[in-house]
Image (spheres, rainbow, N blue to C red):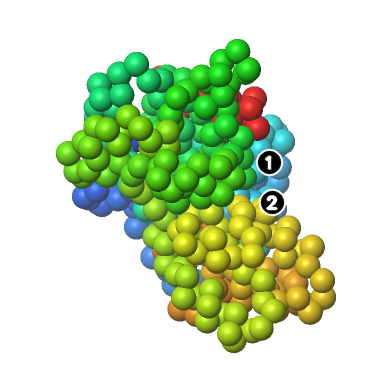
């Protein structure tokens, strides 16, 4: 087995273990390194879905407690059925920590999730991402070089003002590390308010003492939290566009705004529009609209409720029989919620359906491929976050755990 260590153009540093790396025939065409995914052996591509199911069940049984499979809510049915734990990215990292007996953590999700699991897991555990193509378009919207550049510019233009960097969980490990070494913290969609409050609270009251914060990569989670939960106005939020000089802002705005938002978004949640809320209410009078805070501010203010995937799940489960919900999040979770709540009506807010194409990369054949390699004592697609990035990122994650 060979270990390939990459430092992509986007600054994402990670290692991937591949058997027979010398014979690898793929090409690295993107900075993320995701193209290191080797093609699956032909056998996996010709097996029927039934054969895949039987083979996964057999391999999982043989591996027993040596392996734990984590399934993100957005995974498709053929994958999530094998998950020992289901949840959002942060819950899954905590679930994995509850299984220290597992040598292998198979993370059915996307790259940044597997990185976080590697950072938070015990040293003897190996984290595996079944398909290295499974990235996150939002995480890729903030790369370390752009963030370092923005940080330097802001330190200059906002001289004398303390800025606290906050990164959403949906970011590469090297961004979490940046935040860790610059006194900030990671947040999730469930605890963004607590973390942003901490950033702007004076040190003597237990906060980070910031006068402003730089939030990345998702501008919508940052804006929704600041305006809808913390009492800031839309005018208090300035968006930093990494592709424009000085982020596309003038110095006075950057100095005045307490909330600086990175111009990034989720391509899935960005498809929900205010018109979808109007249309669904017309079609199903009395329906409750529940959306994820990665949706735009304009959509969130029209909704009846918003929250993380875990919160959305709880809202629907707590609904009365015959309640109807229109849900603004990824379609695999919406379909599952509909199936698991047969006494209620659960539909997708957007009739055109929103699938996360990167999550969709993980499928039954890839899960079987990693399991069968483990049976042969080969670890494929291992995600290893190297030092010092891992240690600095852990600092930012630990601050979140201490605050939230
Ligand atoms: S749903 Fe959006 S934020 Fe989540 S993994 Fe997909 S692209 Fe990334």
Give the residue pinned by disc 1.
95
Observer-nearest of 360 and 243: 243
Relative side of 39 to 370, left or right? left
Q: Nearer the viewer, mark 1 or mark 2?
A: 1
Observer-nearest of 76 and 165: 165
Relative image position of residue 340 (x, y in whole percent): 73, 70
**Quadrant assignment for the C terminus:** top right
Q: Quick check: marks 1 and 2 in contact, CB under 8 Å?
A: yes
Relative image position of residue 163 (x, y in whole percent): 40, 24
Q: Which residue is found at the position 31% from the left and 24% from the top?
A: 158
Observer-nearest of 61 and 323: 323
Q: Which residue is found at the position 69% from the left and 79% from the top?
A: 286
Q: Which residue is found at the position 27% from the left and 44% from the top?
A: 241
Relative image position of residue 78 (x, y in whole percent): 58, 67
Dot placed on the residue nearer the N-terminal end, 1 or 2? 2
Q: Which residue is found at the position 75% from the left and 72% from the top?
A: 341
What secondary structure is marked by label 1? Answer: helix
Relative side of 291 to 223, left or right? right
Q: Is residue 124 visible?
A: no
Q: Is residue 42 visible?
A: yes
Q: Which mark is residue 195?
A: none
Relative image position of residue 103 (x, y in whole percent): 62, 35
Q: Residue furthest top?
A: 204
Judge the density around disc 2: few (<14), some (14-19), many (≥20) Cα neighbours within 10 Å. some
Query: In the rendered image of this protein, does residue 182 appear above or below residue 296?
Result: above
Quadrant of residue 123 in the image?
A: top right
Give the residue pinned by disc 2.
84
Relative side of 176 to 264, left or right? right
Judge the density around disc 1: few (<14), some (14-19), many (≥20) Cα neighbours within 10 Å. some
Relative side of 260 to 82, left or right? left
């Amino acid at each position: 087995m060979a270990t390939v260590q990459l430092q992509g153009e986007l600054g994402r540093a990670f290692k991937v273990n591949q058997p027979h790396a010398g014979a690898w025939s793929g090409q690295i065409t993107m900075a993320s390194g995701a193209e290191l995914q080797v093609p699956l052996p032909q056998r996996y591509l010709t097996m029927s879905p039934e054969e895949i199911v039987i083979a996964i069940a057999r391999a999982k049984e043989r591996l027993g407690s040596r392996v734990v499979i984590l399934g993100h809510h957005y995974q498709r049915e053929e994958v999530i059925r094998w998950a020992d734990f289901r949840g959002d990215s942060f819950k899954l990292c905590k679930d994995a920590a509850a299984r220290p007996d597992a040598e292998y953590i198979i993370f059915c999700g996307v790259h940044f999730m597997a990185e976080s699991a590697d950072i938070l897991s015990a040293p003897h555990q190996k984290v595996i991402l079944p398909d290295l193509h499974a990235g996150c378009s939002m995480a890729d919207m903030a790369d370390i070089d752009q963030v370092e550049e923005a940080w330097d510019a802001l330190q200059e233009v906002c001289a004398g003002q303390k800025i606290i960097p906050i990164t959403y969980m949906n970011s590469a490990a090297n961004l979490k590390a940046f935040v860790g070494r610059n006194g900030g913290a990671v947040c999730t969609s469930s605890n963004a308010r607590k973390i942003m409050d901490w950033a702007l609270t004076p040190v003597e009251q237990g906060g980070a003492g910031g006068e402003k914060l730089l939030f990345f990569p998702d501008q919508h989670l940052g804006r929704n939290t600041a305006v809808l939960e913390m009492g800031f106005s839309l005018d208090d939020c300035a968006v930093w566009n990494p592709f424009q000089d000085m982020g596309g802002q003038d110095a006075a705005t950057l100095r005045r705004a307490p909330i600086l938002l990175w111009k990034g978004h989720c391509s899935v949640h960005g498809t929900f529009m205010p018109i979808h809320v109007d249309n669904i209410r017309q079609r199903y009078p009395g329906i409750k609209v529940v959306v994820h805070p990665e949706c735009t501010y304009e959509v969130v203010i029209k909704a009846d409720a918003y929250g993380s995937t875990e919160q959305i799940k709880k809202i629907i489960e707590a609904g009365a029989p015959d309640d109807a919900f229109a849900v603004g999040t990824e379609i695999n979770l919406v379909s599952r919620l509909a199936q698991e709540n047969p006494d209620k009506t659960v539909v997708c807010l957007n009739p055109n359906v929103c699938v996360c194409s990167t999550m969709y990369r993980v499928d039954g054949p890839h899960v079987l491929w990693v399991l069968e390699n483990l049976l042969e004592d080969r670890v494929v697609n291992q995600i290893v976050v190297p030092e010092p990035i891992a240690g600095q990122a852990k600092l930012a994650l630990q601050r979140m755990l201490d605050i939230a």
